[in-house]
Image (tube, rainbow, N blue to C red):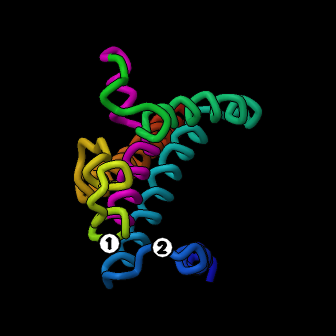
Amino acid sequence: MSFFIPFIVITITYWGIGYNNEEATKYPMFLLAMWLVYNAFAGLGYILGTAIANKQVINILSPLIIVPQMLFTGFFVNQSNIPWFLMPFQHVSIHKYAYQAFFLIEFTGLKMECMSSEDPATRCDPVGDFDSPQTLWASLYTMMGIALAGYLIAFCILYSKSRDYD
């Protein structure tokens, strides 16, 4: 039963906020993206949990790992403005791929009044103005890869610790 609780919460959130439901594929893609985000962060949590035994240290390190990732999402700073020496951190940011996926799911195919405006001052193009280096599927596959890598690294850490007791 607890497996379905996140899907119930996601469903209430999706329809309660009023996300784009013009296409039948929007909601299943949103569910898939949420599931991948959950698993990517769970993989990161498993790595921290298996590598560090002290809960207080994990509580201190978690914000130090997660908050800098938020800088690389493209929400606060344009992704093309990130310095070259920080690029490796940008490519492992779960927030970046989640933000890209949710943005593209919501705004691709969306029809808004400002899109058809003839006045350049009020004209808008959310997807065209979005600086996303990846497509929707590339973002989803990358989150899947981050999740699988997190689970694999956590397993390897546990395996190496179990061999110490032999």
- Is residue 23 found inside the magenta-colored segment of the image? no
Residue kind at label 2, given as amino acid type: Tyr
Closest to the observer: 155 or 43? 43
User: Hey, which quadrant is residue 11 in on the image?
Assistant: bottom right
Name above or below for residue 51 compared with residue 2. above
Q: Earlier in the sequence, mark 1 or mark 2?
A: 2
Near-viewer residue (6 or 106): 106
Mark 1, mark 2: which one is toward the viewer? 1
SS at circle 2 = loop
* Magenta part of the chain: 84-107
In the foreground, 58 or 67: 67
Q: Quadrant of residue 52?
A: top right
Q: Tell me residue 115's x, y (percent).
A: 30, 63
Q: What residue is shown at x 64% (from left), y 29% (from top)?
A: 61
Q: Residue 100: x percent and y percent? A: 36, 51
Q: In the picture shown, does residue 48 fall above or below 40?
A: above
Read off the residue under disc 2: 19
- Depicted 122 relative to depicted 60: above or below: below
The residue pinned by badge 1 equals 111
Q: CA distance from mark 1 to mark 2?
A: 13 Å
List x then y, in percent, for residue 98: 42, 52
Q: Is residue 92 magenta?
A: yes
Q: Position of residue 145 (x, y in %)?
A: 31, 49
Residue 54: image tag: none
